[in-house]
Image (tube, rainbow, N blue to C red):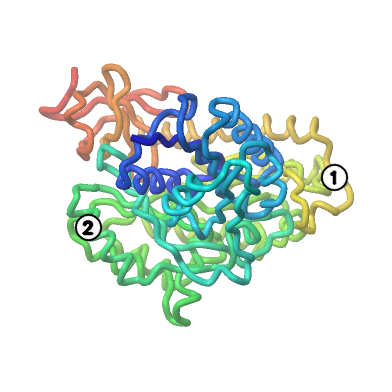
């Protein structure tokens, strides 16, 4: 049996797509092994959102070649999409697959295996204007069948001044609504309690299919699935909360009261330089509206520090704004110039030492705000979907994405159980399962 190993870098979509590619190889008779094991095929699903992502991608390619110089090295993902010629020069690389060809990964790999190793690497990467179809991979699901991730949208047309994603992922493409509904019905039938809808620009769903179709139609359709206990939206831009989507959220019985709404910066001057289509006042109004629709809403976000031109005063405005909004979670990242994006040539580039300092300050503030949010629920009873075992405890999430740990048997994994929250432990909360399922 041929062996295949995977390495994934970057975003949640990349991680889910790797899971899907693993399934494709397994169904074709391959054994999936650890990346550090000797394998016949190594698939590196790369990232290029930051310089660090590109550097790590190159390191993993070279590592695979050292592990087995005779192996077929397949490089896919966003780094291969935007710098295929550069990737082709790395020793050992024999196949470069664009993001739109991941669904053909097994067929393409087997074709490459049958070719001479000394041949020039094969590059199968489409240009942005050629990316017109939504290609479905097998649904990425965890092995315990508790939560499933369903990608329903691909690509981005926003072209923020710092971002390479529109070049790496192409224009927006959407999965037909009937296919989304059928996939969700099948997942529910298989026992999944929660479905997470994902996409590169999820809020743009449907714009390429019909003028009248939108993410609101997806939420409305999936809210009608009585056996779907939880529906979660992965990330929605603040400008994508239309009246129709807000109404769908309000009327839904199964949508989770957790919304990840990227802010990127808390200073209006920097937001304008970034090419974002809103200011802080608009963002604040969106959050106020979301909190009025559902009880105990959690708001998480992404914030970039060190964007060109960001002064100490600008950064302090971000700190003040995150305190005002009271986020329950913040993904902090440092600006990284990407070749070909407008911001890479902006004046007043911020030194790395200052980026590091600001990142540390904001990360500390993020933990403080998370703990403050979690503190609000101590002594309260909440429903937790338990997903994994950690020693003699089990761990899961509330609908508003609080990580909860409690003593309990592994047999309870996949159950949604009432839990009394007792104690803050770092970024999570320890609780006690109520009733007959109490582990202690």
- Confirm whether residue 291 shows in the render: no
Mark 1 → mark 2, Cα distance in angstroms = 50 Å
Using the image, determine if residue 428 lies above or below residue 247: above
Q: Horizontally, is 124 left or right of 198 in the view? A: right
Residue 245 appears at what percent x and percent y? Answer: 42, 68
Quarter of image, res 410: top left
Secondary structure, mark 2, is helix
Residue at image coords 21%, 28%: 433
Q: Identify residue for label 1.
A: 349
Residue 145 appears at what percent x and percent y? Answer: 25, 42
Using the image, determine if residue 338 lies above or below residue 238: above
**The furthest residue to the left:** 436
Of 108 and 98, nearer the camera is 108
Quarter of image, res 284: bottom right
- Confirm whether residue 417 shows in the render: yes
Residue at image coords 54%, 32%: 70
Q: Identify residue for label 2.
A: 186
Using the image, determine if residue 286 lies above or below residue 79: below
Dot 2, how many residues are within 10 Å of its Cα: few (below 14), some (14-19), or many (20+)? few
Dot 1, how many residues are within 10 Å of its Cα: few (below 14), some (14-19), or many (20+)? some
Which mark lies nearer to you, 1 or 2? 2
């Amino acid at each position: 049996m041929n062996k295949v190993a995977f390495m994934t870098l970057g975003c949640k979509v990349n991680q889910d797509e790797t899971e899907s590619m693993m399934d494709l190889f397994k169904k074709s008779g391959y054994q999936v092994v650890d990346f550090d094991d000797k394998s016949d095929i190594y698939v590196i699903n790369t990232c290029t959102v930051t310089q660090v992502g590109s550097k790590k991608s190159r390191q993993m390619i070279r590592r695979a070649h050292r592990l087995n110089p005779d192996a077929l090295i397949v490089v896919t993902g966003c780094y291969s999409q935007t710098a295929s010629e550069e990737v082709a020069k790395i020793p050992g690389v024999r196949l470069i697959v664009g993001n739109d060809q991941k669904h053909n990964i097994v067929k393409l790999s087997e074709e490459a295996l049958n070719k001479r190793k000394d041949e020039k690497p094969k590059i199968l990467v489409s240009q942005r204007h050629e990316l017109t179809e939504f290609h479905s991979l097998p649904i990425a699901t965890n092995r315990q069948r508790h939560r499933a991730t369903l990608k329903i949208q691909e690509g981005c047309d926003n072209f923020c001044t710092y971002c390479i994603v529109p070049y790496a992922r192409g224009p927006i493409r959407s999965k037909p609504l009937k296919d989304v509904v059928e996939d969700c019905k099948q997942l529910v039938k298989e026992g999944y309690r929660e479905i997470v809808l994902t996409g590169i620009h999820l809020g743009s769903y449907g714009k390429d299919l019909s003028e009248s179709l939108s993410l609101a139609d997806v939420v409305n359709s999936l809210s009608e699935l009585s056996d779907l206990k939880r529906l979660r939206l992965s990330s929605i831009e603040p400008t994508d909360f239309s009246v129709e989507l807000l109404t769908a959220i309000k009327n839904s019985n199964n949508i989770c009261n957790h919304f990840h709404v990227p802010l990127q910066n808390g200073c209006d001057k920097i937001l304008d330089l970034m090419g974002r289509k809103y200011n802080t006042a608009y963002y604040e109004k969106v959050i106020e509206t979301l909190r009025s629709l559902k009880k105990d809403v959690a708001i998480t976000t992404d914030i970039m520090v060190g964007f060109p031109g960001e002064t100490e005063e600008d950064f302090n405005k971000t700190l003040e704004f995150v305190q005002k909004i009271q986020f329950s979670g913040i993904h902090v990242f440092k600006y990284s110039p990407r070749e070909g994006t407008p911001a890479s040539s902006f004046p007043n580039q911020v030194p790395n030492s200052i980026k590091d300092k600001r990142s540390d300050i904001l990360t500390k503030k993020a933990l403080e705000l998370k703990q403050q949010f979690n503190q609000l629920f101590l002594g309260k009873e909440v429903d937790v979907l338990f997903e994994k075992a950690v020693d003699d405890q089990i761990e899961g999430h509330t609908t508003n994405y609080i990580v909860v740990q409690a003593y309990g048997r592994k047999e309870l994994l996949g159950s949604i159980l009432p839990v009394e929250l007792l104690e803050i432990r770092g970024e999570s909360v320890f609780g006690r399962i109520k009733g007959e399922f109490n582990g202690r």
